[in-house]
Amino acid sequence: MSDRRLKDATLQAEILVRDESLALPIDVLALAKSRDILVEAKPSTEKGVSGMLLRVGDDFAIGYATHIKSIGFQRFSIAHELGHYFLGHTDAMFRDCKTAHESQAGFGSKELIELEADHFAAGLLMPSELFKEEAAMHCDGLAAIERVAEKCQTSITSSAIRYAQLTDAAVAIIVSSKSSVDYCFASQALRAVKGYRHPVKGSVLPRDSLTRDFNQTASNIARGERSDDLTDLCTWFRADDEIEASEEVIGLGDYGRTLTIITADLPDEDESGTEWTAPRFR
Ligand SMILES: [Zn+2]
């Protein structure tokens, strides 16, 4: 049930992009202005608050936090608040004379309306059609993610998550710190690989992986260093067969975590009995 509502939230944003013929990067400020919504940067006092939606009489205003300097994060925060507006959350939010709603954007909340607004934001800033079109112009993996992030003006992490959702290639993105996995998203093609086991939150990074090695040096993360190597799907996902893959690693700076992208070149003939077929991106 909630899954469907989250998908619908993304879809609603994508329909808005299509109906208003918006282009990348989506101009969230112009979109707000077109609905007479005032948008203002607000130095946030409370940690964890990414932005807020305010009701002033019949009008709405958005305040977004600036404690995280990333333009991508700030745009996501504004898009999240627009989500509350376009998804019709405002009646419930501003019941009982309430005039402000504080948000925690970025998929960290457990509340359904917060998650719905996050999914709307992802669909608005990274609408599937335009996103796929752009990604198809670049090599699978980190190259595509970075170019799309640039084009959409979104953070590398949110672009990577969206990429794993939308690509036809066999790709996983893993966010980690020290020796453990914070979270992992794998594309449909990768999840269909025989024997695939999903790395769960808190699980230990593969012992011989480049990522685990990379994470032992704090400055790699702080300075946004990058590295790449060959790996295989047995190492990362306990796949039944040894399938070669690339492992690309990049330090996420202030975020204090590492982003890993595993991209496998699946054999053309699929012997796993699943329905995975080409075409892939590019
Ligand atoms: Zn919110």
Image: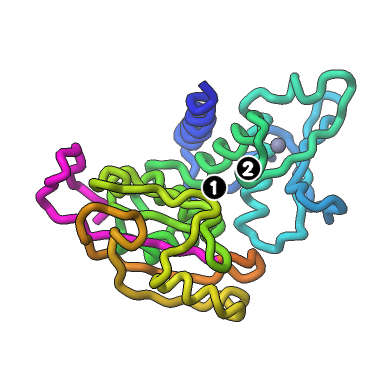
Q: Report the amino acid beneath label 2.
A: Ala
Q: In the drawing, does residue 158 fall left or right of residue 46?
A: left
- On residue 79, which mark appears? 2
**Position of 108 relative to 181 (above/below):** above
User: Where does residue 112 sit, x and y in percent of width and height?
Assistant: 63, 29
User: Where does residue 263 sit, x and y in percent of width and height?
Assistant: 32, 60
- Give whichever of 257, 41 is nearer the camera: 257
- On residue 26, which mark appears? 1
| Circle 1 SS class | loop
Q: Is residue 273 magenta?
A: yes
- Give whichever of 277, 98 is nearer the camera: 277
Q: Is residue 259 magenta?
A: yes
- State yes or no: Cβ of the residue under disc 2 lies below 8 Å from any atom of ligand 1: no
Badge 2 crowding class, 10 Å Cα cut-off, few under 14, some 14 to 19, many 20 or more, is many
User: Can residue 241 be seen at all in this image of the molecule?
Assistant: yes
Q: In the drawing, does residue 232 fall left or right of residue 117?
A: left
- On residue 131, which mark appears? none
Q: Earlier in the sequence, mark 2 or mark 1?
A: 1
Q: In the rendered image, which quarter is residue 143 located in?
A: bottom left
Residue sitting at 48 percent across and 49 percent down? 200
Residue sitting at 45 percent across and 48 percent down? 162
Ligand 1 quadrant in view: top right
Mark 2 and 1 residues: CB-CB less than 8 Å, in contact?
A: yes
Name the quarter where the C terminus is drawn: bottom left
- State yes or no: Cβ of the residue under disc 1 lies below 8 Å from any atom of ligand 1: no
| Circle 2 SS class | helix
Q: Report the amino acid beneath label 1.
A: Ile
Badge 1 crowding class, 10 Å Cα cut-off, few under 14, some 14 to 19, many 20 or more, is some
User: Where does residue 56 sit, x and y in percent of width and height?
Assistant: 86, 30
Q: Overall secondary structure of the magenta stretch?
A: loop
Question: Real-space Cα distance between discs 2 and 1?
Answer: 10 Å
